[in-house]
Image: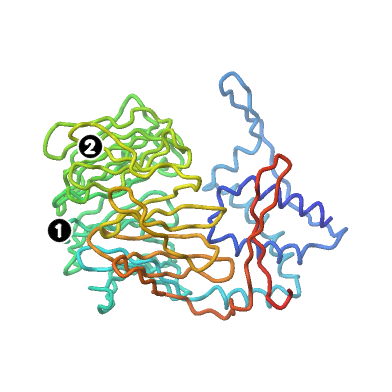
Amino acid sequence: MFCLLSMFLRDLYLQHAKEINPRDMRRNIFILFLLIAHLPVVGQKLNYPDTKIVSQTDVYHGVTVNDPYRWLEDDHSAETKNWVDAQNKVTFDYLTSLPEREKNKARLTKIWSFPRQSSPSYKNGNYYYYKNNGTQNQSVLYKRNGIKGKEEMILDPNFLSADGTTSITLFQISNDGKYAAYGISKGGSDWTEVKVIENASGRELAETIKWIKFSGISWQKDGFFYSRYDEPSGDAAFKGKNEFHKVYYHKAGTPQSSDNLIYADPENPLRNFGYSVSKDERFHYITGSQSSSGNSLTIKSAATDKSFKFSKAFKYSHSVIDNIGNSIFILTNENASRKKVVKFDFETGQQTVLIPEKEEVLLSLVRAGNNFVAHYMKDASSRLYVYDTEGKFNYEIKLPTYCTLSSVNGSDKDSLLFYSVVSFTFPETTYMHNLNSKATTVYFQPQIDFDANGYETKQVFYKSKDNTSITMFIVYKKSLI
């Protein structure tokens, strides 16, 4: 039985590996061991409730597909709720019978309920970050004026709803620092509502911008661009198909009804659109997508009608990093499956390779001081490389161990780079790197009831049947070897 379960869990992991966040990997593995340890003994029978089978078929491209459990997709129906309640009863009747469950629950609660803090982001002399004391449902937004300034709370979403399920999904400050816009999600919904505050006083303006989904916020002067759908009718907000994504411009202090429609594509109802503005407000970037990968990119001048269609098709992914004058830097996988960085000259329309494709996979790029800092993945572990703005490699920022970077934050107006590291043996820890002195210090390290120094991680390689080099990490207690 154990062998069969191991094979099942392996296959299940392989099927869903792309969906697993690296920072959750260590926790997931530990939970897996707990589940195996508490398996029902051979012969024990769990009586699951019957699941109704319906006659439901659909025809896709001439192929008939049976879908006998379609009724379960309506997660707001009383029938689905009753089915979930019955399934949960079977599960928890069994779990509550395990003699070690409460002991394990108490230990996991203790070591997982630790204070957390995100990597700071710099804007107009302030550093913004999220904190959680370890027991809060939602993290709280704070700021400091200067790296050693007094901490000030900006938004605490835990008081926005009685059950604590309302979270902050967006927070963007206008380029002049006058306003800030924040988005909230209620009950885990993809729908976002946006409010505007005066950044200095914290006073909230009257307007609420609704029906936003799959959108960021990008400021231009005293307003911002965002993407939304038309207001759905009835209960279609949670059941209906999302069609006709549109870009609007909202001016702070005005009702949403006054917002200007900026971009729409009525001939392609299922495409999504993003609209962003360069930090110097000289350029507008319009992206379109119609699947989980690949996007179009159009670059426009904010002052004139001049524009370039950098990419019309959806075969490759393009992400604008920053601009220096008329030079626009773009991260792309076009003819570079591991990604590269190109410099696009808006005046001439010419592009050159700034950072060519490497053997490692380029995951992200940020502007920091007068540098670009690249996050690569090499042999299943993160690397940080510093380049100048002409694409010349300067140096590598040494990371503390085999790890995954969960965030890298920098600004061209600041010499400090912040990055958060997750390893196999310690939780998310944030480091601060001075790009002038090249000195690295620990900025925030959680205090937990676990001694990571007693454990070691080693990386080994082996050859697969087709002679491909496969990497594996071995984590063990030092006293074992």
Instruction: Report, in whole angstroms, how far the alpha carbon at label 1 lies from the one at label 2.
Output: 26 Å
Q: Where is residue 386 in the image (x, y as percent from the top left)?
A: 36, 57
Secondary structure beneath dot 1 equals: loop
Secondary structure beneath dot 2 equals: strand
Q: Residue at x 46, y 38 (%)?
A: 292
Left or right relative to 242: residue 63: right
Q: Residue furthest right?
A: 43
Tell me the kind of residue under disc 2: Asp
Q: Quadrant of residue 328?
A: top left
According to the picture, the residue beneath numbered tag 2 turns out to be 345
Local crowd at mark 2 within 10 Å, few (<14), some, or many (≥20)?
some
Indicate whether 264 appears above or below 404. Answer: above
According to the picture, the residue beneath numbered tag 1 turns out to be 176
Q: Where is residue 303 in the image (x, y as percent from the top left)?
A: 11, 39
The N terminus lies in quadrant: bottom right
Q: Nearer the viewer, residue 349 or 205?
A: 349
Indicate whether 16 appears above or below 423. Answer: above
Q: Which of 9 and 184 is in front in this view?
A: 9
Left or right relative to 151: residue 303: left
Left or right relative to 152: residue 104: right
Left or right relative to 161: residue 286: left
Q: Residue at x 26, y 79 (%)?
A: 150
Q: Where is residue 217 in the image (x, y as percent from the top left)?
A: 27, 50
- Looking at marks 1 and 2 on the same chain, the residue that comes earlier in the sequence is marked by 1
Q: Nearer the viewer, residue 418 or 228?
A: 418
Q: Position of residue 87 (x, y in %)?
A: 68, 55
Tell me the kind of residue under disc 1: Asp
Indicate whether 340 appears above or below 202. Answer: above
